[in-house]
Image: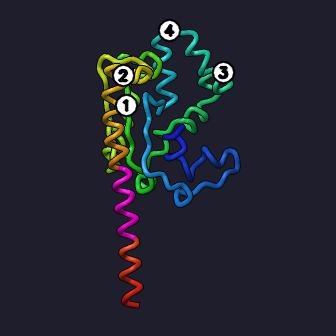
């Protein structure tokens, strides 16, 4: 949801509920997403290969219809569909983590999003754990939890320091302008 909200701020996702959202209103400094669903159509295809009736039923109930009946919803609820050159200017740095053995959300989704973000010049960090499954972070003291939380901690420190620097720079600019005018 964090990715969808950040990427679609001025798009159809909010317009469906007559909600006005502007990137100026949402001062998001960064987004963290563990094993995120980035493309619902791709997720549907993944579930078709997995032959898992429970997962297929979850998508059917979540969209209230079959793929053919609800294609437009699949796109509206896919963060990756909102990536564009214009949106790239408003998307903050993104931290993604996924397990290669995930059978609920294919790590390919995070890989593709990371690649698309990088191509658009958006700061993106992607951690892929080759041995990990969905929910690898539940055991914080486990290898997946420790590794990802260490990198996430560094990402958050970088975000906070970058934000502080921008605020400080803005204050210095205002101070300099007030002294000369």
Residue at image point 52% right, 57% down: 23
Q: Label 4: which residue?
A: 51
Marks 2 and 4 in Cβ contact (< 8 Å): no
Residue 94 seen in render: yes
Q: Badge 3 local density, few (<14 within 10 Å), some, or many (20+)?
A: few
Quarter of the image for the N terminus: give it: top right
Sequence-wise first label, 2 or 3: 3
- Kindly report the distance in space between the C-alpha atoms of the residues bearing marks 3 and 4: 17 Å
- Kindly report the distance in space between the C-alpha atoms of the residues bearing marks 4 and 1: 25 Å
- Where 18 sits versus 96, above or below? below
Marks 1 and 3 in Cβ contact (< 8 Å): no
Quick one: SS at disc 2?
loop
Residue range highlighted in magenta = 159-170
Q: Label 2: which residue?
A: 141
Q: Label 3: which residue?
A: 61
Residue at image point 67% right, 45% down: 16
Magenta span: chief secondary structure: helix
Coordinates of residue 81 in the picture (x, y in percent): 48, 40
- Kindly report the distance in space between the C-alpha atoms of the residues bearing marks 2 and 1: 16 Å
């Amino acid at each position: 949801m964090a990715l969808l909200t950040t990427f679609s701020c001025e798009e159809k996702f909010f317009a469906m509920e007559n909600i006005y959202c502007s990137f100026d209103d949402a001062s998001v400094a960064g987004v963290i997403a563990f094993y995120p669903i980035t493309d619902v159509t791709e997720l549907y295809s993944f579930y078709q290969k997995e032959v898992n009736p429970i997962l297929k039923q979850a998508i059917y109930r979540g969209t209230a219809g079959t793929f053919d009946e609800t294609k437009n919803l699949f796109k509206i609820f896919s963060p990756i569909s909102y990536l564009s050159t214009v949106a790239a200017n408003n998307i903050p740095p993104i931290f993604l983590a996924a397990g290669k053995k995930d059978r609920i959300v294919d790590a390919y989704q995070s890989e593709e999003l990371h690649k698309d973000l990088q191509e658009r010049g958006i700061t993106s960090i992607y951690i892929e754990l080759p041995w990990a499954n969905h929910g690898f972070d539940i055991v914080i003291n486990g290898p997946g939890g420790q590794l990802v939380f260490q990198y996430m901690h560094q990402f958050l420190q970088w975000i906070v320091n970058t934000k502080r620097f921008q605020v400080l720079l803005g204050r210095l600019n205002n101070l300099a302008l007030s002294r000369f005018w």
